[in-house]
Image (cartoon, grey):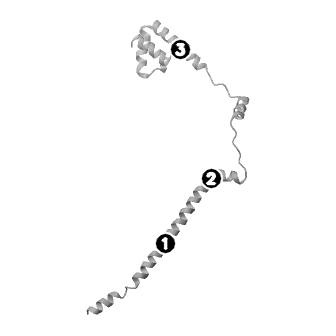
Amino acid sequence: MTRERFEDLAEIYGGDIARWPLAERDAAALLLAADPDFAKAALAAPAGLDDLLGAWAPQPVTHQLREAVIASAPRSRARSGVRGWFWRAGLGVGLAGACAAGLVVGVRLSDTVVQQDDTVSAALSGYDDLSEVVVGEGA
């Protein structure tokens, strides 16, 4: 490992070699053993940043902060009475109406088709005896 690579890794991953990628740790340990003064100097600045970041902890949320956030939240509009019920149920009412309209149209169409079939059947029933007449004449 070169010195430049060691410095780059120290800047990227910090001053603790144990946090470096596994593939780089052995080469870093060899450089640390070969040139300890350089390696310790290269790890000193990132180690200070690691200490600062490790010491940081989020502040606990106080009751006052929680209440202030809740108070600043927008309020929902409360709808009352029949108008409020229709507003909340608007989608359901619309879907129910569409379903009912589809049912009515389907029943009306099927009734029309049945009436037409009955008319055709009645017209054709007058010709039921025709085959007997035609066959009887030819014999």
Q: Are marks 1 and 3 in contact (CB under 8 Å)?
A: no
Secondary structure at numbered mark 3 = helix
| Between discs 1 and 3, the one toward the N terminus | 3
- Percent position of residue 117, x then y: 44, 76
Residue 130 percent location from the top left of the image: 34, 87
Which residue is identified by label 1? Answer: 112
What residue sits right under mark 2 in the picture?
Answer: 90
Q: Residue at x 58, y 16 (%)?
A: 52
The residues tagged by marks 2 and 3 sit, at their Cα atoms, a distance apart of 62 Å
Question: Is residue 28 or residue 68 the one in the foreground?
Answer: 68
Tag 2: Cα neighbours inside 10 Å, few (<14), some, or many (≥20)? few
- Quadrant for the N terminus in the image: top left
Whether residue 72 is situated above or below residue 23 in the rendered picture: below
Q: Is residue 75 left or right of 41 when viewed as pictured?
A: right
Q: Seen in the image, is 74 located left or right of residue 138?
A: right
Crowd tier of the residue under label 1, counting other residues whose Cα lies within 10 Å: few below 14, some 14–19, many 20 or above: few
